[in-house]
Amino acid sequence: MSTVVASKPARTTRISFFRLGIVIVSVLAVLAFGFWLIRPSVIQATPPGPTNFAGYVDVTAVPPYPFETPEGPEQQDVILAFVVADRAEGCTPSWGTYYTMDQASSDLELDRRISQLRLTGGQVRISFGGAFNDELSTTCKDVNALTDAYRSVVDRYEVRSIDLDIEGGALSDTAGLQRRATAIKNVQSGLKAEGRDLDVWMTLPVATSGLTDAGLAAVNGMLSAGVTLAGVNGMAMDFGGSRAAGQNMADAVIQASNNLQGQVRTAFAAHGQKMNATESWAKVGITPMIGQNDVPTEQFTIADATAVNEFARDKGAGLVSMWSLNRDQTCQHPLPVVITIVQTNCSGINQEGVSFADVLGKQANDTTFAEAPATGRPSPTPTPTATSPVIVDDPKKSPFPIWDPLGTYPAGSKVVWKQKVYQSKYWTSGFAPDTPVANAYDTPWTLLGPVLPGDKPAPLPTLPPNTYAQWNAEQSYVAGTRVQLGNVPYEAKWYTQGQKPGVAVAGGSPWVLVYPTN
């Protein structure tokens, strides 16, 4: 009899979802880590944008800086500083409290010089504020009047970009900050309605840690008011105790700029404008003080400028500037070459013939601030040819006397020649203002700019009564004889009788104005 053995049931394996989850998470973590490692080679980072360079010009500094005739592309775009409140009229803009807008036009030829710069392909940005004097928003308590004040400057100089340099007491004036933000928003909105845009930069002091709390509050105030900010420019200078012992100025500037970029990115994001790193760097400006800083132990050198330029272009900083183009030269006698007291017209260090502007602006692209010629160089004055049109100067429309080859012109004399205004650098006679020269110092004339629409003849030079005899139509005069017509002095260029001084005649007047010497 056979025995039947019952078979055991087959053994089954149950899936543990908990363990499976751990495996899946582990695999995903490994894959994610691997992707993170190779990501830079798989996904290309956003390339840095263009870095624009524009140096500050102290408009009221003496001697004046000739921004209207830039030496090269790095000097072609400028930030003109500073428009502040008039001392007597808190809502009236002035240049450094010294000149109203009209006075700057007549005394500094500012309107004409801006026009001349634009003829070379350059552009200007107007800066309001600065370390000294009162920024308009601190003295003008009526927002509508403040709006009109800002707008009047924008319209007069036909600018599409302004700079708000907020420092010192203006940075702690909460009410002023609010008025400024509201007024600038009003200006932007008004221009927008007319189909015009206005770029607004804020320039603020920075430590190596970035913006101060007050500076950050000022940025947030502007953004909260709805102002469209082109960027925030850090005054990377005068670091004092925030600069580590032994840290060179380039490293301090770079540290400050890195921290500023983080603050800018965070502030814009908090107001609904999220940006990646590249986009946020385009909103950052870097402005060192060249040469000797206000802190005696801080000197920003050419080597520092080289490092900052490379850093800015690598990151795609939206703006690189400097304080200031007026100071971009080695001090000359009687000053020592190296001096720790800050000067307005030299850097205080030995630049050895190298320009800070050339170094800081090296390979900087400019696509938003100016519309420069393709060469990036100022347009040369065309050489007259046989087919060139004859340019006739009309004394009735010329703001200054027409240049005369037989006239004598002391230093500072202004003349018109071929629809352009020139000023003599020293005494000269017989040297045409448009004479081609190899170097600027080979001519006694400085080009100020074109004759502008609406120009009217300037008052003629005068001398006290009876300095010379009054002109007499019945008397004959030989070359070199001087007379007065009223109080205006003239000198005979050749023999003449009956020809009244100051009257244009065919072939040229026998009389030339006499410019009083100082």
Image (cartoon, rainbow, N blue to C red):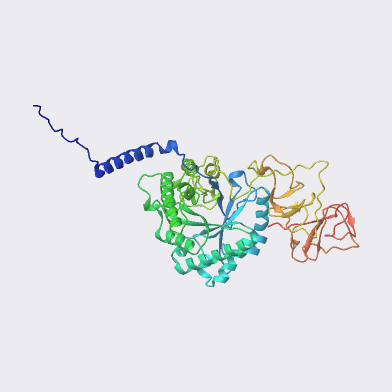
Q: Residue furthest left?
A: 1
Q: Residue furthest bottom?
A: 142
Foreground pick, 490 / 310: 310
Query: From where the camera sits, is residue 239 visible?
Result: yes
- Residue 378 position by quadrant: top right
Instruction: Give percent across and percent down for residue 514.
Output: 77, 57
Question: In the rendered view, does 244 fall on the left or right side of 274?
Answer: left
Instruction: Give percent across and percent down for residue 206.
Output: 43, 54
Q: Is residue 487 above or below residue 45?
A: below
- Residue 383 position by quadrant: top right
Foreground pick, 203 / 247: 203
Foreground pick, 307 / 478: 307
Query: From where the camera sits, is residue 333 visible?
Result: no
Question: In the rendered view, does 239 fall on the left or right side of 22?
Answer: right
Q: Quadrant of the N terminus?
A: top left
Instruction: Give percent across and percent down for residue 493.
Output: 83, 52
Q: Residue at x 65, y 64 (%)?
A: 102
Q: Residue furthest front?
A: 1
Q: Residue furthest top?
A: 1
Q: Residue at x 15, y 34 (%)?
A: 8
Instruction: Give percent across and percent down for residue 127.
Output: 55, 58
Q: Quadrant of the C terminus?
A: bottom right
Q: Is residue 170 above or below residue 330?
A: below
Count every numbered label the image shows and give the total.
0
